[in-house]
Amino acid sequence: MAKIIDGKAIAQTIRNEIADEVRSLSDSYNKVPGLAVVIVGTRKDSQSYVRMKRKACAEVGIRSFDVDLPEDISENELIDQVHKLNADLDVHGILVQLPLPKHINEEKVLSEISIDKDVDGFHPLNIGKLAMKGREPLFLPCTPKGCLELLSRSGISVKGKRAVVVGRSNIVGLPVALLLLKADATVTIVHSHTQDSESIIREADIVIAAAGQAMMIKGDWIKPGAAVIDVGTNSVDDPSKKVGYRLVGDVDFQEASKVAGWLTPVPGGVGPMTVAMLLKNTLDAAKRKIPQ
Ligand code: NDP
């Protein structure tokens, strides 16, 4: 049976470490890390993500700057807000909650965030540096960084291993593949046009599943003993639940748990790590501002 990687517990350990560091930063340098969380409009899912991020900040002592903007704000007005936050010395990280309303060009807005405050790690310069040998990005995107942290804190080495990433999105699949490559794994990326994904995945010592396809990866697609990190978060109808649905990953958990060596659950695996890595990136951004 697979060892279940408890992302919630690992994330809590990291949050405690961050809280300690935030306290000592404040004691020694009178500096409190600050994260601006910008939300445009009233989408329920975005509001709940933003609430969760702001609460997580408060719990570790990071000051959160709440910027709540109306749905009909213009692109230029939003960019002005980003510029103000870029100039604010108390703000060390800026997060613009996605998706933005249709009339706003997300790419344009995100590229206005100062690279040294890009705690989401989505700036093309950060991703570009991640892809290049010998270059270090200022920030790693939170979910990919969380996946690697789950592996290392579970004692799973990456070097020389065969890794397969399922998905190639800018926010998960591509950066996690680049991170694995930087960590000396041999990496294959599987996407929606890949033929015979099943046999490619079956060769992997490490599988990172980020396709957004409910329970796509079956037990017999997994190499016995492999480490399986399931990023997928998909809702499936479940009349037995009060809300009428439940969340499942991209991996068939029941089947995979009989074959894999390690496995993350959904929920309670990668999700909590994403928020913990956002806090860590904000702390690191503030630490960089301490005069040497
Ligand atoms: P996207 O929809 O942006 O990307 C999905 C990727 O999976 C694409 O590259 C797509 O290929 C590929 N794909 C789709 N179907 C298949 C298939 N049948 N076989 C192989 N590859 C396939 O999703 P995201 O990257 O944003 O998110 C992926 C999942 O991770 C989602 O379930 C999302 O909810 C979850 N997520 C979880 C987070 C967390 O913190 N736990 C954070 C972010 C995301 P192609 O490029 O060819 O279209």
Image (spheres, helix red, strand yellow):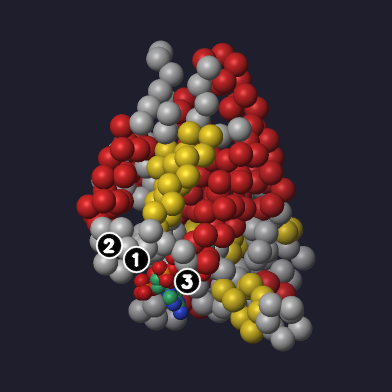
Question: What whole-number distance in Å separates the C-alpha atoms at marks 2 and 1?
Answer: 6 Å
Q: Can see residue 247?
A: yes
**Label 3 lies in ligand 1 vicinity (Cβ under 8 Å):** yes
**Where does label 1 land, which residue?**
101
Q: Quarter of the image holding residue 4?
A: bottom right
Total numbered badges shown on the rendered structure: 3
Closer to the camera in the image, 108 or 251 = 108
At 52% across and 26% down in the image, what residue appears? 32
At 56% across and 46% down in the image, what residue appears? 54
* Amino acid at dot 3: Ala
| Residue 59 in the figure: left or right of residue 158 | right
* Amino acid at dot 1: Pro
Give residue 92's position: percent from left, percent from top: 42, 33
Quadrant containing ligand 1 reads: bottom left
Give residue 11's position: percent from left, percent from top: 65, 46
At 72% across and 86% down in the image, what residue appears? 239
Q: Are marks 2 and 1 in contact (CB under 8 Å)?
A: yes
Precedes in sequence: disc 2 or disc 3: 2
Q: Can see residue 175?
A: no
At 42% across and 33% down in the image, what residue appears? 91
What SS does tag 1 mark? loop
Q: In the rendering, which numbered label is found on residue 211?
A: 3
**Label 2 lies in ligand 1 vicinity (Cβ under 8 Å):** no
**Where does label 2 land, which residue?**
104
Q: Residues within 10 Å of mark 2 (few under 14, many from 20)?
A: some
Q: Quarter of the image holding residue 171?
A: bottom left
Of marks 2 and 3, the one in the foreground: 2
Closer to the camera in the image, 288 or 220 = 288
Quadrant of the drawing holding the N terminus: bottom right
